Image (cartoon, rainbow, N blue to C red):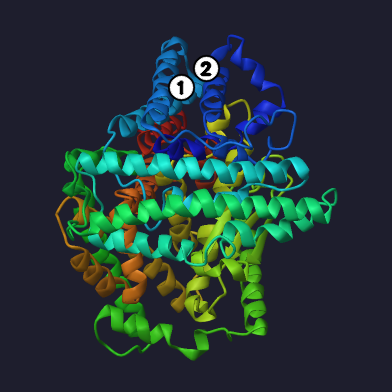
Amino acid sequence: MRLFKRLIVGALGLAVLAITGAAFWFWITPVGVNNYVNKVSLQLATDSPELLTRLGMIDNTLLDFHSDKLGDYTKAGEEESLEKLRKARAGLDDYGPEGLEGQELLTWQIAAWFFDDILRQSEREYSGYRITQLGGVTVNMPEFLTDAHAIIDRRSAERYVARLEEFGRVLRESQERVIDDREHGVVPPDFIIESALVGMRKFVEGGAAGNVLVTTLPERLAAVEELDEASRARLLQQAEDIVRDQVIPGYEGIIVLFEDMALTANHDAGIWRLPGGDAIYRDRLRSSTSTDYSPDEIHDTGLNEVARIALEMHAIMDQQGIPEGPLAERVQVVMADPSQQFANTDAGRAEMIDYLKDFDAKVMARAEEFFITIPPQPLEIVRVAPEREDGSPGGYYSAPALDGSRPGRFYINQKSTEDNPRWKLPTLMIHEGAPGHHFQISASQLIEDVPFLRRLSPFTAFTEGWALYSERIGKTDMGLYDDDPLGDLGRLQAEMFRAVRLVVDTGLHARRWSREQAIDYMVTNTGMTEAEVTREIERYAVIPGQATAYKTGQLAILDARARAEAALGDRFDLREFHELVLMNGAMPLALLQEQVDVWTAAQGGDQ
């Protein structure tokens, strides 16, 4: 359900509330805006068994009423959930904003924006593609069942089998929704249909016995001591029967539907192709950037940033003696430099991990010069598991557990060490680790006396903007590239990647660029390969606006800082500024600017 895909980030951690007794809020009247936000978030989360399982703290407890079920994917079910959200948002007005101040007012403003944004998106029923090469039940549900549903005892094993049967129902419901979407003019582009078909055909090609929902089960059952061999065999056979009789037919029905849609689908890439597409895109931009910037404003900002960054990249490559030529060709020269490569061996991979650890230690040694709160949660640097490398990005961050049971982790994809040469690693480490995602997300978990929504960073423009801002201060304030010009080139290429996204996303969805035009622009201005860029552009085609959040967020934080510096002059304290930004948690960018202005005035600055 698209509504709850938008709720999932904001609802992370609500299981903690349930376990500590907050489930009783269903029957009592909350006191204050914080308790109200926690209560309604918990109530909304209970509509999604998948969400509750992903929280990881309710399954297989006395509060587990859901782990043998999957959500309702019908139109009626989605409308019922949407109506609950409408009532929850209306109820928020009983708690403010009149009479609130300080942190309580900020909580009300953040929650109101968050719920209004979900409602604005969800009220547009025919505004996107339900199943694509990247998402939808055909992509997400198998991963959910094999990875998120824990099998720890007989009951959870039986519930896994029950969920397989539920998956058959979900596929049938989703097929009906795709048919309904089609009747209302929502059909993906031909290249998206074909990519989705490739994945669905691969899923069913081995039959039930060779399907991942079955082949991953024996090892999981073997770890359950209370199951004897006969019980394991019975459960495995039940799973295979359900996959053969319900799951695979469900996929086959959607495959036939997509093959039929492919006969008449066109090649237009942008969301403008849908009824009301221009308005849909404006809503998506507002949601992703948490601003009111128009597509033209974002496009022009991107063009300006691309031009600026290109000049800086060329200057470094000139200094390093890289042969003159187009930017993309010069970047490829650096990519092929043997001195920047780690051996694609176990020893080379271990050397890369050691390099990342050493760089992180260098950053942390200076962190107190620039930050007041240093998150106590540890950061681990680990390799992406080999079996997951094909579907994983080059590097990504996983937040620490709210209860402290799991540290923050930076995962580095080492399938081919050539993908992550030495000159790119410092910026990747800053972005995903310190002072990027690890500092921001870990700090938000430390905030006290606010609802969980504010501790869980459900605003992409803020979280990714902070990570890009961190890359910048690694250069301008922390001096981390002073002796590493190629590392600085890596920083600029990463920034160029995000600036290009502003151009191609708005190009596709507002200026009616073709898929090929967007690919050509991105290849030319980043030095990435055509295969890499094609995957990126096809992602932007099905998730309009999301790619604009990163650079927009960085520029907003830089602008807020510049305004505060101009107003305060010598009284500006960078550590205090960072404390303000991090220890209020993620929020829409307009609210961030308001908070910085209030802080600046309190410091005696001229506004």
Q: Secondary structure at mark 1?
A: helix
Q: Secondary structure at mark 2?
A: helix
Q: Quadrant of the C terminus?
A: top left
Q: Assess disc 2: are there few (<14), some (14-19) or many (≥20) residues with their C-alpha within 10 Å of its C-alpha.
A: many
What type is the residue that disc 1 sits on? Trp
**Quarter-wise, where is residue 31 in the image?**
top right
Q: Residue at x 19, y 38 (%)?
A: 279
Residue situated in front as seen by the camera: 155 or 95? 155
On screen, residue 165 versus residue 494, left or right, reads: right
Label 1 vs 2, first from the N-terminus = 2
Whether residue 27 can be seen here? yes
Q: Find residue 536 and report its horizontal and vertical position in percent.
A: 34, 63
On screen, residue 297 versus residue 143, left or right, reads: left
What type is the residue that disc 2 sits on? Val
Whether residue 566 can be seen here? no
Do the numbered discs 1 and 2 sit on residues whose CB atoms are within 8 Å? yes
Q: Find residue 483 and report its horizontal and vertical position in percent.
A: 51, 76
On screen, residue 59 versus residue 204, left or right, reads: right
Residue bearing the label numbered 2:
33
**Above or below: residue 29 compared with residue 75:** above
Q: Find residue 339 and report its horizontal and vertical position in percent.
A: 51, 89
Q: Quadrant of the N terminus?
A: top left
Residue situated in front as seen by the camera: 592 or 52? 52
Residue bearing the label numbered 1:
108
**Quarter-wise, where is residue 343 in the image?**
bottom right
**Quarter-wise, where is residue 283 in the image?**
top left
Give the spatial CA distance, label 1 vs label 2: 7 Å
Q: Residue at x 47, y 62 (%)?
A: 204
On screen, residue 500 versus residue 389, left or right, reads: left
Q: Find residue 561 and report its horizontal and vertical position in percent.
A: 40, 45
